[in-house]
Amino acid sequence: MIHAGDASYLYDNDIVFGMVINGIAKAYPQRIMGWHEMVVDNFDDSRVAGVFGRSHIRGNPGV
């Protein structure tokens, strides 16, 4: 994980998906999620997983 200011590959108008768990906020760029289609992350003692459906490939709604 990197700080937002260090993400030189992102643009100000990029879409990100955000999560706040146990007071910890994290963002996952749509462009990266579209490539990897999933995320597994830790928020202190909580482990979370999420998926991103690429609707233009599968023909169904996105997230």
Image: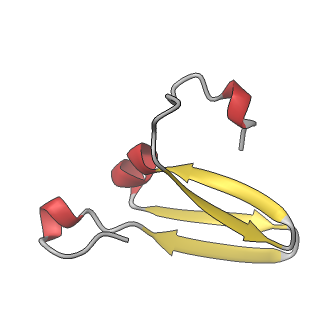
Indicate the quadrant containing the C terminus: top left, top right, bottom left or bottom right. Answer: bottom left
Indicate the quadrant containing the N terminus: top left, top right, bottom left or bottom right. Answer: top right
Give residue 8's position: percent from left, percent from top.
59, 22
How many marks the image carries: the answer is 0
Which residue lies at the image location 24% right of the left edge and 74% below the top edge?
Answer: 61
Q: In this view, does 29 lie to the left or right of 61?
A: right
Q: Is residue 19 left or right of residue 23?
A: left
- Which residue ends up furthest to the top in the rendered image? 8
Image quarter for residue 5? Answer: top right
Which residue lies at the image location 18% right of the left edge and 76% below the top edge?
Answer: 60
- Camera-nearest residue between 12 and 33: 12
> Compared with residue 44, is residue 34 higher up or lower down, i.e. above or below?
above
Which residue lies at the image location 12% right of the left edge and 71% below the top edge?
Answer: 59
- Camera-nearest residue between 38 and 24: 24
> Compared with residue 29, is residue 10 higher up or lower down, i.e. above or below?
above
Which residue lies at the image location 39% right of the left edge and 66% below the top edge?
Answer: 52
